[in-house]
Image (cartoon, rainbow, N blue to C red):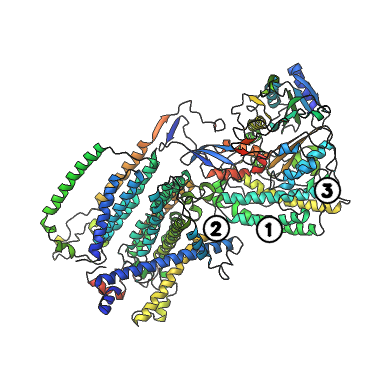
Amino acid sequence: MPVERVDPELVEFDVRTDEMLINMGPQHPSTHGVLRLVLRTDGEVVSSAAPHIGYLHRCAEKIGENVSPRQWIPYTDRMDYLAGMNMNLGWAMTVEKLMDLEVSEKTRHLRVIVCELNRIASHLVAAGTYGLDLGSFTPFLYCFREREKILNLFEAVCGARLTYSYIAPGGLIADLPPGWLEACERCLGELQAVVPELHAMLTSNEIFIRRTAGVGVLSPEMAIDYGCSGPVLRGSGVKWDLRRDGQPPVARMYEDYRFEVIAQVDGSYPRDQEYPPVPPEAVVGDCWHRFYVRMLEVVQSIGLVRQAIEHYRRSAGPVSEPIKITQKLPRGEAYLETEAPKGQMGFLVVGDGTAIPWRVRARSSCFCNLSVLTEISRGCLLADIPAILGSLDIVLGEIDR
Amino acid sequence: MEVGLILDKLKQRFGERILGADLEAADPSIEIAPAALAEVARILRDDPPLRFDYLHCITGVDYVQPDAKKAKSFPWEVHFELLYHLSSMAHRHRLVLRIKLPRWQGGVEGQLPEVPTVSHLWRTADWHEREVFDLSGVRFAGHPDLRRILCPEDWQGHPLRKDYKTAEEYHGIRTR
Amino acid sequence: MINWHTCFFLLFATITCAFAVAVVVSANVVRMAVCLIASLAAVSGLYFLAAADFVAAMQLMIYVGGTLVLLVFGVMLTARGPFVSMKITPANWLMAGLAGGALLILLLCAATSVDAWKTAAVAASAPAAEGGHTVAPIGMALLGIRVDALEQANPALRGGIAGYLLPFEIVSVHLLVVLVGAAHLARARRRRRPAEAVPDASRSA
Amino acid sequence: MIAEYLTTRFGLPEWLACGGVALVQCLILLGIMMFAAALFTWMERKVAGRIQDRLGPTRVGGRFGWLQSVADGVKLLAKEDLIPGEADGLLFRLAPYVSFCAAFCVYLALPFSNGWVAQHLNVGVFFIVAIAGLEVFGVILGGYSSASKWSLYGAMREAAQVVSYEVPLGLCVVIPVMVAGTLDLVAIGNMQRGWGVNWLVFHNPFLFITFFIYALCTLASTNRAPFDLAEAESELVAGFLTEYSGFRWSVFFMAEYGSMYAMSGLGAILFLGGWHGPIPLAEMLGLSYANHAVLGWLGDLLGAGNFLCKAFLGVAAMMWLRWTLPRLRIDQVMTTCLKYCVPLAAAMFVGTMLWTYALPGGLLPRSTPLGAVAEAPPWTAPRAARGERP
């Protein structure tokens, strides 16, 4: 709860201590990577938290102006290294939008399978490390045990466990190996069983609620104003998910799938799955709700992958081949945002007729989500900083690009 | 609301400061004069039928061909371009604002072009403008805290400029 | 008569005096606090030797556990706090030495003038009751029973004092009220100056 | 008792005998504490492994990795003991030993069985509570002398927490003492002889709740589980332990495990019948001094085993809590202390007082009357008669 002042005119200090400037990071266990937070604290109360980023800046955009789109795919993997597939998808669809390419039905469904599995893996990492930030070690291991199963599936598909480079502009680099779908269904069954455990361990845990409910409250207007997206935006009660209300290419990809956008609209979440009740202390837009949205999205994604497997089994024909490296890009611009696990990941490509794009731009969701930290952590306690930062679920690779 | 209608609405209000539009492209865009950015942005955000409340990102694109050989086949004339991708959650429509700037202010090498800031309209512009200033070298007048955000504070030059040469060394560390 | 009793007594006595002097001499504030802790703990050791278990434990709990924790808190929380070291000018030394010396001499004369303490022999075989057993008598005295005259033949002499429980309680409540008042007064209250609006952090790093 | 046995039997000079006895007692206690610390480092990893659905150490020396704590010890001894540049050298070195001594002194007054106590203090409980309050100095000195902002934060948090939790801890300790009528731990232990029903925790419902408040306060005052704010990795890196490494760091941890074991031992005596098992095996098997000295000694040994198991279970419960619950925030820790523990403990105090007033004999038939004068174990009687002290 931020410290409320009864009479704003009268500033009362128990003991007049001068403010301390503390550096939290860039090497710090709970900043999820190389982020440096300069905290001005008065005793335990943090009066201002100024994030300093750029420690992981590799200027991937400059490299994008020297290599062809097909060769830039590995760079997108290393932006949000916890959700490589979704990053590849974003860049691939942007180039396809520029070249006005259409991929086969089978490819589209296979892309949904892989991207939703990666969303589950990314949310599991977010839930696990969030438990770590608040001091409980055990959920971290349960989450990573499940994530290992998904990584094994990805390893069978494209040979890599973290930086897949599987989805390329124009299609996919390979089709599924035989027997993969059955293994995937088995894994989904086990995942379905773990979610209630995670709810029991964290979501409805009394101390977890006390540490996160009402902490770092982000109002919907401020969320839109700061350009937040993904679970951070939906946690504040804004019902906006690019898989349903995105630009035409993205919306078409998910058009024949039934799923709910997880956001608390007029007091309740979509009731298509059983989930623990919202505690009374939790205010819409606080850390607890952001975590809760992610947990519900995991169940949504499991449903999506099941539907995608059915669609994939029914669709015939080969998987479409990715474009050649020497493929000429038409002149013009194309900007497309897709729903990555952390938020809306946007790519801009400016073609000039040759095979090398003239300008490449990546709009990072965590970049905007992090900019909110200063606003929502004003007046919180030092122990709340990791709680708020963990709930924003940022990845520095994507922020610094 | 169709981009064409938005274009006509803006033309009535701002007249000749709306320089042009490209409606057939995949992302329809409207080009405006750099000076008019602040007012146009305010109208786009506050006017109820438009209500562009979500600024996706600000991008700087540098149109120049540094090496002479390819200069002949260069399709565009030399200039610097700023792209503002906007969208409205209420009306679900999108728009791209395009601003053409000289590469250097008054043609003097090293003088960064000047554009009014929109960080008071969309809070996300605060960091995005700092990033464009840091990487592409555009000064935003009125920005509360225009510092480099990704490169170190005392970095020389703006990396995403086409004619950018990395310095030999940085604090004694060889960069090339 | 060298036995553990006198050996420990000397040990504790030297610790107490040495650290007491160290408190005065040392420049670093926190070192002073540590020396004070050591000397008071040694005093509690002396009480144990004198078989006064209850008082020794009380000393440990009240002085070392309570007062000095507050002292260290105070040292830590003050503005310049633990990193300050006080310079002592020779003039201060002189005056302190004079005052201290005078008091010391006074004490020594007073101590040596009491004839009961003159003969060292008496001190050696003090009637140290086994394991103290001082808690029950202290409790009863608090309630008003004349512990020293317990075996007195005629019951009239057994009673006679009103016990110390009531004054003890009054003093503790009084102390509590005083402390709460002090804390309340110490709160620095000032009108919020308009200029000092809530500092917008993104403006200043 | 052993002292004058040595002087009469071997004609040792009197001071050497007493000195030797004291030395032996200290070594035994130090051995128990070291063994407990080693056992708990191994057990912590095993319990954590079990809770997190993994095995914990398995290959370090034999099947169950029981050599893990020895390996840790060797690693810590081999590690370089560095002292930060502008740290206050003297206090930096002193801090771990202050903390360790405080944790060790608690064992002096802790009886392992009927009469098996290093120093039979008449004010045993009070002494332990007083000494437990000293451990916070080691932490404060450690935090201050590391001269880094983070350690100062850790030290301040720990000090504030431990000092404020001494109040409810003291209250919870006073309640069984009030029922037992004496501060002498050996007497309290003897009072709970017989069937498990005689344990003080079942004496009245208020005392039953007091046991759980006591458990909570022990967690907070030994800085464990949901209250381990001082070394909250996610915020303060390692709190006051940030600058410590190698042997000094391990001394701090031995102090922590030692005080954990001691406080759960105190809890066992005050509430769970000390060295008496739920079923009075010693009486059943006739292991008492009446029959034969050696049999009596065996009874005491069985009692010591009982006590060690109970303390062991207390520590196991602490570890179990540590690996399941997230950490509390500093202001929540303070509010639980001030708004929940203290009033609840006070209420239990009043409740117990009224209960003992209303039912002096207690609800259930007791094998030994409460409030009886402490019966010292038979073989220590002769020493009480003489005025001679070690």
Instruction: Identify the disc placed on residue A107.
Output: 3
**Where residue C142 sits: x, y (%)?**
24, 56
Q: Amino acid at mark 1?
A: Ala
Residue at image location 52% in from the left, 48% down from the top: D237
Task: Name the residue carrying label 1.
Answer: A193
- On-image quarter of the C terminus of chain D: bottom left
Question: Residue D217 got which mark?
Answer: none
State the residue position of label 2.
D323
User: x and y percent of residue D98 in the render?
Assistant: 38, 55
On screen, A30 above or below D180? above
Q: Is residue B26 visible to the viewer in this orientation of the structure?
A: yes
Image position, residue D258 (x, y; %)? 43, 61
Instruction: Give the chain letter at badge 3.
Output: A
* In the rendered image, the vertical position of residue A74 relative to residue A139, given as above or below: above
Label 1's element? helix
In the displayed structure image, the side of residue D217 where residue A369 appears, left or right: right
Residue type (three-letter) at the residue carrying disc 3: Thr
What residue type is disc 2 on?
A: Trp
Q: Is residue A54 left or right of residue D352?
A: right
Task: Name the residue nearer the viewer: A380 or D9.
Answer: D9
Q: Residues within 10 Å of mark 3 (few under 14, many from 20)?
A: many
